[in-house]
Amino acid sequence: MLITLTFIPVLNKEIHQIRNAMKTRGAVSFWKPELIYRAFIIPLVVRLVNISDTLTLSVETKAFVCSDLRPSCYKKIVFIKKDSVTSGLFILLILTAIFMKIKIGEF
């Protein structure tokens, strides 16, 4: 819980740094979705993944464990039929979007 609460100011700092970088590059408008995606969301996700990876390594090097019974917190994830159906529908959705984009002629 303490790590979560201390992460909020770090997140706020990262958002301000990305916004300042956007202003420096001249990408000030937040009304364009492609600008938000390229200039704000991608850098934010990359920085947050980097911070969380560093935090994870720090916790693991300090011998953090979830319980006394198991030495690891990880559990095996099994790919089930529901996952296959969801993946298939997602691929179908992407292919439909690509097909429609080609038909419109903007691809």
Image (cartoon, rainbow, N blue to C red):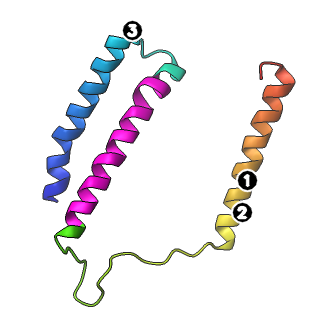
Please check the rendered image and state whether residue 28 is part of the magenta-colored stretch, yes or no. no
Residue 59 lies left or right of residue 81; in this view the side is: left
Helix, strand, or loop for circle 3? Answer: loop
Q: Is residue 59 above or below residue 4?
A: below
Indicate the amino acid at tag 1: Leu
Q: Residue at x 67, y 59 (%)?
A: 86
Quadrant of image for the C terminus: top right
Helix, strand, or loop for circle 2? Answer: helix
Helix, strand, or loop for circle 1? Answer: helix
Query: Which of pointers 3 and 2 indicates the residue nearer the eye?
Result: 3
Quadrant in the picture for residue 56: bottom left
Q: Which residue is mark 1?
A: 89
Q: Residue at x 78, y 42 (%)?
A: 95
Quadrant in the picture for residue 61: bottom left
- Furthest toward the bottom, the residue is 69
Quadrant in the picture for residue 28: top left
> x, y (%) of residue 30?
42, 16
Mark 2, Cα crowd under 10 Å, few <14 / some 14-19 / many 20+, is few
Please check the rendered image and state whether residue 54 is part of the magenta-colored stretch, yes or no. yes
Where does the magenta region start and end? 36-59
> x, y (%) of residue 60?
24, 69
Indicate the amino acid at tag 2: Val
Q: Residue at x 51, y 16 (%)?
A: 32
Q: Which residue is mark 3?
A: 26
Q: Residue at x 26, y 61 (%)?
A: 57
